Amino acid sequence: MENRTALKCAHGCRNYGERLSCPPHILSVEDFRKILSEYSDALLLVEEHNTADVQDILEAWGKFQKESFHRMFELEQEAFRKGFIYAHLLRPGPCNECEKCNLEKCVKPELRRFPPEAVGVNLQKVLEKAGIELEFCKPDKTVCVGILLAR
């Protein structure tokens, strides 16, 4: 966990303050660090998407991230059903369940999850430890990463 990762969210992400799943509407890095100490296991979820023939990468990213999230969310729900009642998913990218986020009150709270970067998780280092190289600005592939926490 790194404070500078959350800094990049606050100063560099177009979703900052625009979604209830993103800073400043979520836990601070310090609060998440405390909660993280209560988990013993983390499952790294990685989906690679071929984007070699994609014209609009930002539009495709939103679609890929949403599809990946739903598959990862099913894993969280299955973990819950298997007795991991505090299983919690850190989603790939910011929530995009609604076209525009209702900042007054989430209309889909059962799906509200925040991305790992928003609470200081350095995904590049996490992936490197898992033997996966995260390559940036590669037009031929897009990677969606989630983390399923359990105890």
Image: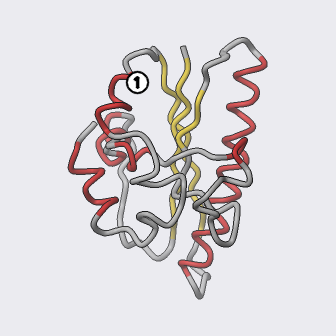
Q: Residue furthest bottom?
A: 55
Of residues 78 and 126, the one drawn nearer to the viewer in this rendering: 78
Q: Position of residue 134 (x, y in %)?
A: 37, 54
Q: Residue furthest front?
A: 104
Residue at point 58%, 51% (across, down): 47
Residue at point 71%, 57% (across, down): 67
Question: Which residue position holds label 1?
Answer: 36
What type is the residue that disc 1 sits on? Leu
Q: Callout 1: helix, strand or loop?
A: helix
Quadrant assignment for the C terminus: top right
Residue at point 47%, 55% (across, down): 22
Decide if residue 78 is on the left or right side of residue 143. Answer: right
Of residues 107 and 115, the one drawn nearer to the viewer in this rendering: 107
Decide if residue 61 is on the left or right side of residue 23. Answer: right
Residue at point 58%, 44% (across, down): 113
Decide if residue 126 is on the left or right side of residue 92. Answer: left
Total label count?
1
Is residue 24 placed above or below 62 in the rendered structure? above
Q: Position of residue 68 (x, y in %)?
A: 66, 53
Is residue 15 placed above or below 143 in the rendered structure? below
Quadrant assignment for the N terminus: top left
